[in-house]
Image (cartoon, helix red, strand yellow):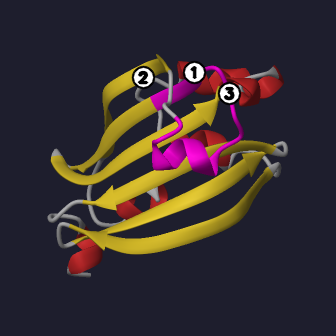
Amino acid sequence: MTERLARYCQQVTVKLYQEGFILLDSQYEEAKLLPNSQRYWLREVVLLGDGCPWLYGRTVIPEETLTGHESELINLGSVPLGKYLFSGNNLTRDYINLGIQNNCWVRRSLLRLSAKSLLLTELFLPDSPIYTK
């Protein structure tokens, strides 16, 4: 998505809001979509196009996914997730769900990286170019 958004601006930047290990209560919808784990890595960011917020991203990763090469996911910081995910050929998508929340488009994907799960939710904010271009 970062590459697509980059077509509409001079610079796409990632503003990191939160990242770290969390516990997911089984009541959370996300917990029901992922393999059971004691802890999950949570990363919340906003992608900005020329300083304007365009996309809110939330990634939830079971701790068991963060082994081997995938352990690098906890060190992304302000690097776009897509830059890491699409750098190899070991990514597959189980499904993608589309919807609308507060008049904004949202999509949720269950991805597998080297056959290990992660959940990506993307909320396209009102100023996103997807609504006008």
Say what secondary structure mark 2 lies in: strand
- Residue beneath label 2, please? 19
Q: Give the number of the mark in front: 3 or 2.
A: 3
Query: Viewer-proximal residue, 8 or 62?
Result: 62
Q: Is residue 108 magenta?
A: no
Q: CA distance from mark 3 to mark 2?
A: 17 Å
Picture quadrant where residue 69 is located: top right
- What residue is drawn where x is 44% and y is 65%? 107
Please report whichever mark, 1 or 3, sits nearer to the chain's N-terminal start. Answer: 3
- Residue beneath label 3, please? 37
Three-letter residue code for mark 2: Glu
Magenta region, residue range: 26-42
- Residue beneath label 1, please? 74
Say what secondary structure mark 1 lies in: helix
Q: In x, y percent, where is residue 91?
A: 76, 52
Please report whichever mark, 2 or 1, sits nearer to the chain's N-terminal start. Answer: 2
